Image (tube, helix red, strand yellow):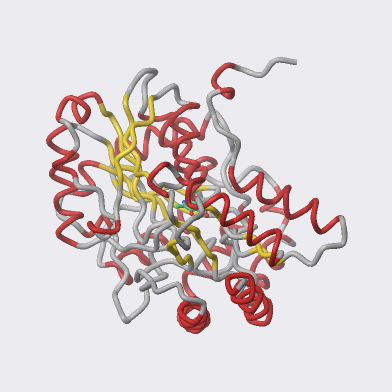
């Protein structure tokens, strides 16, 4: 049966293809190590699991979620307190906070809430592929803005032609950045608020890696910039800081009109997050802060190890400050796809080819540090040997 035209415009999802490739090799008995996907392997904190079990035993939570699409008020209040405490951001939990089924859901529903068919929507190249899909499903036209190492992987807003900016109704961004690991500066974020205000562009500042920054830098919320709530929303998620990717819980905060519009889409699409998971989310945000620091130490150690091994193998490279991804230049003489294929054939290690994130991703590959230490060591040893030959 034919699918809808809008689906045909969406390129195959890189991670699905990678997962299938890994699955086929493993089914054939090959010991493949995947460094391609950012999905923490360490367990969710015990306190969160206990709280889920407790709440799941309460029949009151077996019904449709309280406050349906918005999320329980107690969850939204907890999110507001978390933002005040960790990022010095004040939001009204009644009108400026919305529970999400992960920030990916938020991106998609933001697009449906804001973008009209034919609207230009800005996103970075390289960029998180799900933005393109969300824009296309909403009927918008993805317009990419290159991000380059010379500009610390931040878009140069003044280089966006003003007729393009005038046509754009929204923009997706995320810093700490997937895939490059770059972090935003305060100066850039202030400029972003002004740019968005000038052109009436709604910013979807997708910030699921906000807590993953190295070298003692403080996490930076878009909403801590003066005027940010006038022009956009920030999406955040419990997936990465608390090893909860499978739980599907996140939040949108900021502009009241956008929050109400996303909420309207959700009202007509899903019925919100299982209450028991929201209680577990409250436990994460109120009782598990130390697990963030613990995971940061693990990633920092793995990061240093990978950078050192790459250096031994002849790849000189300085890691950016954020996320659990390393965005590494491919050795000369191979495209990112050829290099990734070569590593798969020779080392049985899967990395994400930069080209999968856009034209400007060419020349790079992405390594994720969400792999157990022993497997990461084995993978890097295999990569070192493959690069030797
Ligand atoms: C930039 C970015 N946004 C959103 C997501 C999805 O996060 P969530 O699990 O909260 O849906 C990811 C996951 O890898 C991501 O890299």
Above or below 61: residue 315? below
> What residue is drawn where x is 32% and y is 26%?
120
Q: Is 133 positioned to the left or the right of 388 in the image?
A: left
Between 221 and 164, the one nearer to me in the picture: 164
Above or below 341: residue 139? above
Q: Can residue 294 be spotted in the picture?
A: no
In the rendered image, the quadrant that contains the N terminus is top right
Where does the image place residue 290, in percent across and percent down from the top left? 48, 82
Q: Can residue 354 be spotted in the picture?
A: yes
In the rendered image, the quadrant that contains the C terminus is bottom right
> What residue is drawn where x is 36% and y is 29%?
114
Where does the image place residue 100, in percent across and percent down from the top left? 50, 48
Where does the image place residue 387, in percent across and percent down from the top left? 58, 70
Where does the image place residue 10, in percent across and percent down from the top left? 54, 29
The quarter of the picture where residue 344 lies is bottom right
> What residue is drawn where x is 36% and y is 52%?
174
The quarter of the picture where residue 160 lies is top left
Above or below 279: residue 256? above
> What residue is drawn where x is 36% and y is 18%?
118
Number of numbered markers: 0
The quarter of the picture where residue 187 lies is bottom left
């Amino acid at each position: 049966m034919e699918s809808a035209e809008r689906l045909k415009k969406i390129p195959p999802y890189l991670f699905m293809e990678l997962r299938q490739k890994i699955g086929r090799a493993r089914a054939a008995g090959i010991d493949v190590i995947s460094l391609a996907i950012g999905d923490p392997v360490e367990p969710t904190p015990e306190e969160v699991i206990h709280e889920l079990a407790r709440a799941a035993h309460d029949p009151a939570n077996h019904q449709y979620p309280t406050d349906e699409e918005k999320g329980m008020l107690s969850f939204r209040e907890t999110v507001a307190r978390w933002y005040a405490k960790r990022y010095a951001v004040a939001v009204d939990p009644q009108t400026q906070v919305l529970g999400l089924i992960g920030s990916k859901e938020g991106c998609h529903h933001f697009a449906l809430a804001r973008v009209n068919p034919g609207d230009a929507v800005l996103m970075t190249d390289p960029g998180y592929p799900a933005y393109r899909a969300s824009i296309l499903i909403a009927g918008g036209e993805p317009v990419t803005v290159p991000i380059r190492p010379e500009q610390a992987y931040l878009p140069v807003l003044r280089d966006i032609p003003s007729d393009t900016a005038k046509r754009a109704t929204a923009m997706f961004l995320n810093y700490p950045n997937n895939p490059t690991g770059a972090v935003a500066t305060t100066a850039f974020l202030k400029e972003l608020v002004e740019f968005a205000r000038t052109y009436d562009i709604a910013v979807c500042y997708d910030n699921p890696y906000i807590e993953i920054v190295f070298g003692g830098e403080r996490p930076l919320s878009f909403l801590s910039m003066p005027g940010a709530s006038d022009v956009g929303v920030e999406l955040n998620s419990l997936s990465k800081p608390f090893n909860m990717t499978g739980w599907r819980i996140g939040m949108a905060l900021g502009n009241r009109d956008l929050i109400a519009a996303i909420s309207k889409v959700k009202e007509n699409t899903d019925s919100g997050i299982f209450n028991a998971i929201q209680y577990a989310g409250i436990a994460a945000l109120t009782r598990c802060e130390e697990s963030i620091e613990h995971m940061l130490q693990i990633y920092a150690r793995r990061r240093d190890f990978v950078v050192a091994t790459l250096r031994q193998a002849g790849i000189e490279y300085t890691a950016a400050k954020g996320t659990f991804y390393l965005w590494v230049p491919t050795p000369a003489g191979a495209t990112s796809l050829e290099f990734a294929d070569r590593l798969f054939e020779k080392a049985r290690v899967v990395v994400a080819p930069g080209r999968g994130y856009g034209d400007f991703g060419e020349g790079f590959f992405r390594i994720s540090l969400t792999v157990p230490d022993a497997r990461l060591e084995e993978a890097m040893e295999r990569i070192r040997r493959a690069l030797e030959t």
